[in-house]
Image (cartoon, rainbow, N blue to C red):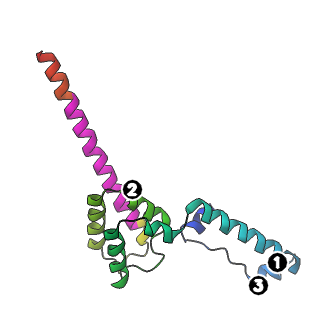
Amino acid sequence: LLLHKIAVGHATLIESDDEDNGKNGKGESSEKKLERSKAEKTISLVLGDIAKAKNELSEITQNKLQLLTDQGFLREGDLDIFELKMLKSLTPEQQVETFRCFEGADLKKVANKSGLMSGIMRRIAQDARKQQDAQIAAAAEESNHNEVQE
């Protein structure tokens, strides 16, 4: 759970002076640093590089993210790697719809922009799946209807 919180930016691995000077003394300082270093390396291996994920987005999407940052609606780090990868997996039309909905929210009052973006993308993906399922069902029904007539 802690690694997930760190990965999405809700917690950090920071050593406090109290821990270093606590009941176990200064002898654990290098041990804790090594543990922190290993955890940070694991997180970056699992999640990947945010800069690389941004570069993998379409040029239009990169420009839109930059515009939102320039306008002060987003800051670097507001969107984490999960959202960037999910955004990349959407069709260009779905990405446009995601940004339309995202911009429609009062972003100055939204504390968790990553959560907002994730929710919007999840809803858009669910709607697309429902529409696709309905089209498949309609095609299957039409096919069955045609077979019965023959």
Question: Disc 3 or disc 2, which is closer to the eye?
Answer: 2
Observer able to see residue 117: yes
Left or right: 33 as drawn, with respect to 61: right
Which residue occupies 48% across, 68% down? 80
Label 2, residues with CA under 10 Å away: few <14, some 14-19, many ≥20: some
Which residue occupies 17% across, 18% down? 147
User: Which one is nearer the viewer's eye here, 88 or 14?
Assistant: 88
Q: CA distance from mark 3 to mark 2?
A: 43 Å
Farthest-out residue, left: 149
Q: Which mark is residue 143?
A: none
> Which of disc 2 and disc 1 is earlier in sequence?
1
The C terminus appears in which quarter of the rendering?
top left
Magenta stretch, residue numbers: 116-140
The N terminus appears in which quarter of the rendering?
bottom right
> Which of disc 3 and disc 1 is earlier in sequence?
3
Q: CA distance from mark 1 to mark 3?
A: 10 Å
SS type, badge 1: helix
> Which of disc 2 and disc 3 is earlier in sequence?
3
Q: Amino acid at mark 1?
A: Ser
Q: Which mark is residue 29?
A: 1
Observer able to see residue 109: no
Q: Is residue 13 above or below residue 89?
A: below
- The residue under label 2 is 89
Pointer 3 with pointer 2, Cβ within 8 A: no
Pointer 1 with pointer 2, Cβ within 8 A: no
Q: Quadrant of residue 118?
A: bottom left
Which residue occupies 38% across, 75% down? 110
Q: Quadrant of residue 25?
A: bottom right
Q: Is residue 98 above or below residue 23?
A: above
Main SS, magenta residues: helix
